[in-house]
Each structure stands twice: as structure tokens, then as C-alpha cells.
Amino acid sequence: MSGQHNQSDPSSDLVSQLLDAALLHVVFDGWSKATFDAAVSDSGVNPVLAQALCPRGAVDLALAYHRRGDQMMLARLSETDLSELRFRDRIAAMIRYRLEVTEDKEAVRRGVTLFALPQHAATGAKALWGTCDAIWAALGDTSDDLNWYSKRTILSGVYSSTLLYWLGDDSPDHQATWEFLDRRIDNVMQFEKVKADMRKNPLLKPLMAGSEWLSSQIKPPAGQDDMPGRQR
């Protein structure tokens, strides 16, 4: 979803206007109908058009805010050379970029609350998946088997736990969050090291080979557009 709108797209510009207006009210009313109505009034966007652009009201504005963060993360990456970093440090940098470009921590906090509601949980999970897919795609991931799913699933866990830690972090420059992030990625890398050691073990190697053969038979569905956040 992120990065798909052209900056000159009138509908995208109108959603941005609504979003900018909404951010002034989110801190008080959350991503609610009251916030959406206030955004429509403050932005001057025709109410009928606003409803057509955002059928779910503030929920769609919360998603637009999330996509804006993804786009800003990728824009920052385009201005940065990560080639000299270890791969685990590139992942850490991308997550850090995603959090650092956040314009309003309270808006994110209110978004987490919104997408924790049962009726919006699937939408929130899809947005999170899209962020993690954007990170992997930006880092050059070309996997198309079970690894495509497992990489994004693992990263979703790392990103979401770091996000929650960041929301409660009041340390200078969020230093405690970045240390937490490093620990979480180290845990994942240790898991990968265990798998690599198993491949070298003559007793376990046949088991790993069978597991990896099974993984290779599981492909993403042919209709890639149906996958949440799937980059073509």
C-alpha cells in the first residue's frame, strides 16, 4: 500500500489534508468519529467526498498515517548508505528509521489502541505486515517460499515489541529502545545460528534437509495482490 500514490494524485492530496487536520485532534479524541468530523470541518474538504475517500472514517486516516510513516522510512533509507553494515544492523536501522520518522508518538499510541480492538485487529495486522514487507523488500529480499512468510512473521514480532517498548520509553533519545531492539534482533540471529549448526550436524542434517524440502514446496499464492503488503 505504501508508496503507491503519486504525489500529484488529487485524492491522495485530499486524504493528506484530512490527516494533517486530524492529527490536531487525535491527542484528545483518538482515532474516532469526533476526530474525523473535526478533520473534515477544519480541512474544508467536502463531507461527502471525505466519506468517499475514507469510508471507515478515522480508521482510514489512521491507516493513512501508518502508510505515511512507511513512506518516510523508505525516503530516509534512500538518503542513507547501509552497505557497510552487517545485515542484522541494517534491519535494526530500518526499524529505528521507522520509529524516528514518527511525527506524533501520541497518534501512534492511539493507533495501537484502535487496532487492538477486535473489529480492527485484522486491519492493524495487515498494516504491520505491510511495514515489515516494505523493510524486507527495501533490503533486497527476493525469497518466494516459506522464508517469505517466516521473515516477515519474525520481523513483525521484533517490530511490534520494539514499538510497544518505544511508546513507554522516556530515556534520552530513546536509547533504551535501541538497546532493546538490539537484544531482540540478537535473539533472532541466535535462532538462525542454531539452524545453521543443525545443518552441519551429520545426525541432524537429514532432518533439516527434509524440513527445507517441505518449505520449498510451499509457495505464496499466484494472486500476489491478495497477500497483505506483498510487494510485486
Image (cartoon, rainbow, N blue to C red):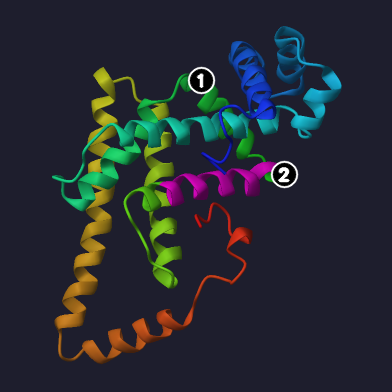
Q: From the viewer's perspective, is residue 56 above or below residue 137?
A: above
Front in this rendered view, residue 124 or 10: 10
Q: In this view, does 229 lie to the left or right of 17?
A: left
Front in this rendered view, residue 45 or 135: 45
Label located before the other in sequence (1 or 2)? 1
Q: Name the residue under label 2.
A: 119
Look at the image and tell me whether residue 183 can be seen: yes
Q: Mark 1 points at which residue?
A: 106
**Start-end of magenta stretch:** 120-134
Q: Quadrant of residue 196?
A: bottom left
Q: Rate crowding at label 2 as few (under 14), some (14 to 19) or many (20 or more) other CA atoms within 10 Å.
A: few
Q: Position of residue 92 (x, y in %)?
A: 27, 42
Residue 199 falls within the magenta-colored stretch: no
Q: Quadrant of residue 82?
A: top left
Q: From the viewer's perspective, is residue 152 above or below residue 177?
A: below
Residue at the spot 43% in from the left edge and 72% down from the top edge: 146
Q: Where is residue 231 in the image (x, y as percent from the top left)?
A: 50, 54
Look at the image and tell me whether residue 165 can be seen: no
Chief SS of the magenta region: helix
Please state which amino acid type lies under the numbered disc 1.
Answer: Glu
Q: In this view, does 211 lie to the left or right of 202?
A: right
Which type of secondary structure does the marked residue at label 2 adopt?
Answer: helix
